[in-house]
Amino acid sequence: MSGVLKVTLVKSMVGRPEKHRRVLRGMGLTRMNRTVVLKDTPSIRGMVRKVSHLVRMEVEA
C-alpha cells in the first residue's frame, strides 16, 4: 500500500463509545467535517475500519 488516505468525519462522536473517540482523536479528527490526510498503512486502515460508520475515506495515489 502506498499513497495517502483522506479521511473526513461525517458523523458526530457524541454518544459514541470511548474506544471510538480515542481512535478518531488518534487520527486527528476532532470536529465534524474535518478532513485529515494520512499515510496509507495497515494500522491506519484498521483504525478507519473500526469507525467506518462515522467517517468517509478517499484513496489518493
Image (spheres, rainbow, N blue to C red):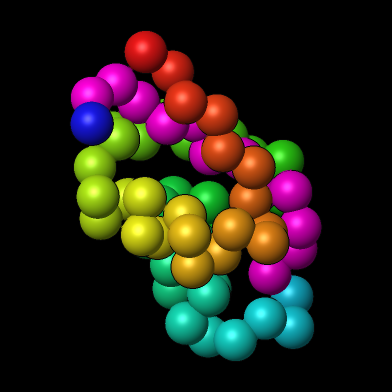
Farthest top residue in view: 61
Residue 21 relative to residue 15: left or right? left
When asked about the image quadrant of residue 17, the answer is bottom right
Q: Is residue 25 visible?
A: no
Closest to the observer, 21 or 4 = 4
When asked about the image quadrant of residue 61, the answer is top left
Location of residue 34 with respect to 22 vertically, above or below:
above
Location of residue 60 with respect to 5 vertically, above or below:
above
Closest to the observer, 46 or 16 = 46
Q: Is residue 23 visible?
A: yes
Farthest front residue in view: 1
Give the quarter of the figure containing the N terminus: top left
Highlighted magenta segment, given as a residue range: 2-13
Q: Check if residue 40 falls in the magenta segment.
A: no
Task: Tell me where residue 55 appears, x and y as whole percent.
Answer: 63, 51
Point 30% across, 35% down: residue: 40
Point 47% across, 55% down: residue: 48
Total tally of numbered discs in the picture: 0
Point 74% across, 83% down: residue: 15
Residue 57 relative to residue 37: left or right? right
Location of residue 38 with respect to 4 vertically, above or below:
below
Task: Tell me where residue 10 appears, x and y as whole percent.
Answer: 74, 48
Closest to the observer, 43 or 19 = 43
Task: Tell me where residue 32 appears, x and y as whole percent.
Answer: 72, 49
Task: Tell me where residue 25 appears, x and y as whole percent.
Answer: 45, 62
